[in-house]
Amino acid sequence: ELLRPAVHMFGEDDAALLEHLAREEERYVQWEAGMEKAVRGLDSEGCGGARLVLLEIGCGLRVPSVRMEMECVLRDLLDGATHETDRVVLIRINPDFPQNPLFPAASTISIRAGALEALSEIDALLKGLREENT
């Protein structure tokens, strides 16, 4: 039996694959709705709920579906937002195309680097912050 990733290629009509992808898409939609609800949630003092970092790594422009999805999630949370704007940030790591001109600078961080380099730097910074706070 041929093993392959569960990815829909252009023009494919494998019924089992399409059924699997539909189930996975529904799971993703439910997860996304729950995540958005958690971020929008208000506590008893009127403060926002959870904080969210959308971490996009290496998504280029040739097949921009992941970039577009991250932008859609960010837009959903920022549209009509009152308190969410400081609770959600998109971090876009890409050596060639890290920019995100569609959103306010406060909502995005563009890192022009490869994945390993950027994640290593982020890890070092987080370790430093944890050490300062202990």
Image (cartoon, rainbow, N blue to C red):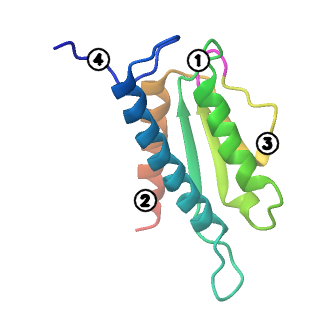
Q: CA distance from mark 1 to mark 3?
A: 19 Å
Amino acid marked by disc 3: Ala
- Report x, y in % for residue 72: 70, 41
Question: Looking at the picture, which amino acid does disc 2 mark?
Answer: Arg
Question: Magenta segment range?
Answer: 93-97
Q: State left or right for residue 118 relative to residue 5.
A: right
Nearer-the-camera pick, 22 or 55: 22
User: In the rendered image of this protein, does residue 58 appear above or below residue 9?
Assistant: below
Label pair 3/4, CB-CB below 8 angstroms: no
Please report whichever mark, 2 or 3, sits nearer to the chain's N-terminal start: 3
Q: What amino acid is at disc 1?
A: Pro
Identify the residue at horizontal 55%, vertical 34% (top origin). 56
From the image, tell me which residue sits under label 3.
105
Q: Nearer the viewer, mark 1 or mark 4?
A: 4
CA–CA distance in space, label 2 to label 3 = 26 Å
Q: Nearer the viewer, residue 118 or 98?
A: 98
Q: Which residue is mark 2?
A: 130
Q: Nearer the viewer, residue 27 or 76?
A: 27
Q: Which residue is denoted by mark 1 in the rendering?
A: 95
Which dot, 3 or 4, sits closer to the camera?
A: 4
Instruction: First in sequence, mark 2 or 4: give its number.
Output: 4
Q: For the residue carrying disc 2, how many other residues have a C-alpha within 10 Å: few (<14), some (14-19), or many (20+)?
A: few
Determine which of the numbered discs, if any, sits on residue 4 in the image. Answer: 4
Q: Earlier in the sequence, mark 2 or mark 1?
A: 1
- Say which quadrant the N terminus sits in: top left
Position in image of residue 119 (x %, y %): 45, 34
